[in-house]
Amino acid sequence: LSPLAFHVLLSLLEGERHGYALKREILARTNNALKPGPSLLYGTIHRLLEQGLIEESDERPDPHLDDQRRRYYRILPAGLAAVQDEARRMQDLLNLAKSYVAL
């Protein structure tokens, strides 16, 4: 997974989100280190949809508080498995790095 795809999936673990909410959450989580523009963010979302890791949700929050143009996304079981696999891969890399340098 790309770093952005990983962050999108992590955000969706907390519940359904629309694109702009995903962007805000990623900015907050990375302390603005990862700043996805619209084409990169929505390109990543499109790839995650194609890969069957997320799906578009038909559920909407309170219609009075929502913009009907927003598309909401939720993580699928395959997306959860992908996040778990990527987290294990990252942990293995961290363990390897620790064996070479004092962190």
Image (cartoon, rainbow, N blue to C red):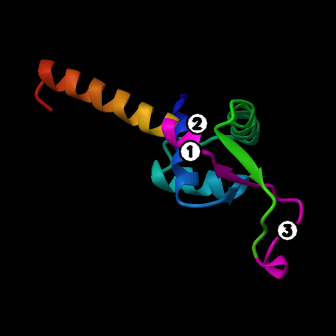
Residue at the image position 58 percent from the left and 53 percent from the top: 12
Q: Which residues are magenta?
A: 62-81
In what element is the residue under mark 1? helix
| Residue 78 position by quadrant | top right
In what element is the residue under mark 2? helix
Rounded to the nearest angstrom, the CA distance separating label 1 from label 3 is: 23 Å
What number is the disc on residue 67?
A: 3
Q: Amino acid at mark 1?
A: Leu
Q: Amino acid at mark 2?
A: Ala
Q: Which residue is mark 1?
A: 9
Relative to 91, is 15 on the left or the right?
right
Circle 1 crowding by C-alpha within 10 Å: few under 14, some 14–19, many from 20? many
Rounded to the nearest angstrom, the CA distance separating label 2 from label 3 is: 25 Å
N-terminal of the pair, mark 1 or mark 3, is: 1
Residue at the image position 57 percent from the left and 37 percent from the top: 4
| Residue 70 position by quadrant | bottom right
Q: Nearer the viewer, mark 1 or mark 3?
A: 1
Looking at this rendering, what residue extends furthest in the front direction? Answer: 77
Circle 2 crowding by C-alpha within 10 Å: few under 14, some 14–19, many from 20? some
Decide: is 9 above or below 74.
above
Residue 72 in the magenta stretch? The answer is yes
x, y percentage for residue 46?
76, 35
x, y percentage for residue 32?
51, 48
| Tags 1 and 2 touching, CB below 8 Å | yes
Relative to 64, is 42 on the left or the right?
left
What number is the disc on residue 5?
A: 2
N-terminal of the pair, mark 2 or mark 3, is: 2
Residue 53 in the magenta stretch? The answer is no
Relative to 90, is 36 on the left or the right?
right
Rounded to the nearest angstrom, the CA distance separating label 1 from label 2 is: 6 Å
